[in-house]
Amino acid sequence: MTIQWFPGHMAKARREVTEKLKYIDIVFELVDARLPLSSRNPMMDEIVQHKPRLVILNKGDLADHEETMKWQRYFKEEGHESIIINAKEGKGIKQITSVSQMLLKEKRERQVARGMKPQPIRAMIIGIPNVGKSTLMNRLVRKNIAKTGNRPGVTKGQQWLKVGNELELLDTPGILWPKFEDEEIGKKLALTGAIKDNLLHLDDIALYAIRFFNEYYPQQLQARYQLTDDQLAEDAVAQLMTITQKRGFRDDYERASEMIVQEIRNGQLGRLTLDRVENWEHEDE
Ligand code: GDP
């Protein structure tokens, strides 16, 4: 399900998240490791403010690991701890509890010093559509569907889900809108399936993807579509035509575009990272 965002929806989404923030100790900001900034809500800092935050780079299996590590350094410099996970297979999710405990250590120590029994950490997942919020929640509460019931500190109709004995998760994630401000971000979001295909032309997305692979991962493109060195040296439009013919689609470029986009989303062209740290650092200057 992809949401169409209008100003009214955005304001409502923001209100809902803000309302729930007061019940939680920490925010789990879920982003797509292939595009850690483009898949981030543009108002995240403003909305979350000083609440402790853990940045979770999901879909780590689809991203270029070297780049993901660069992003972790970027977030660290920004003042945020981050972890890399694959929610689909449950990889890396154990760190969520341990890193949260580390981030909230002082608060817990204060509780203990006052003779209070440390309470489970209360958290909420926030992210744009399709970033993997439901997948992660299902993974985390898999064997622990038992809800914690009518404990205080929760809005009507909301419940806490137990994740082991140390963590409690709000049962509905916060869904916020992605960045739409520039066309390139829109293409990246469409290519990874974060926004509806019909918002952009598929052939534009496919051409954007082909150009991107030519720049960063030419061998992966060449291997998948068995392009000769001469074909790899051609421009993206010529390459799209070549791929269309090779797949037996004659001149149905639309069909070939759809296939290319689908194959990239599925990881069939290998891992890729669309947001490059160096470009964003450069843009900030
Ligand atoms: P939500 O809208 O944020 O709740 O996103 P979903 O949990 O529905 O996930 C969107 C899509 O991403 C689904 O097809 C998931 O199977 C897929 N997905 C979620 N996490 C991962 C992951 O770590 N790796 C991969 N490859 N796919 C994932």
Image (cartoon, rainbow, N blue to C red):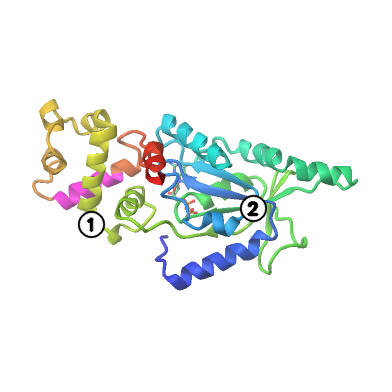
Q: Residue 2 bears which disc, if any?
A: none
Residue identifier under label 2: 50
The kind of secondary structure element at disc 1 is: loop
Would residue 207 appear left or right of 120 to someone viewing this image? Answer: left
Q: Which residue is drawn at 42% across and 63% down?
A: 3
144 is higher (above) or lower (below) than 200:
above
The kind of secondary structure element at disc 2 is: loop
Q: Residue 201 bears which disc, if any?
A: 1
Under 8 Å from ligand 1: the CB of mark 2? no
Start-end of magenta stretch: 253-262
Q: Nearer the viewer, residue 66 or 243?
A: 66
71 is higher (above) or lower (below) than 31:
above
Q: Is residue 240 visible?
A: yes
Estimate the x, y position of residue 206 in percent, counting from the top left.
23, 47
Would residue 208 appear left or right of 58 to someone viewing this image? Answer: left
Q: Which residue is drawn at 12% across and 50% down?
A: 252
Estimate the x, y position of residue 94 in percent, counting from the top left.
62, 36
Marks counted in the figure total 2
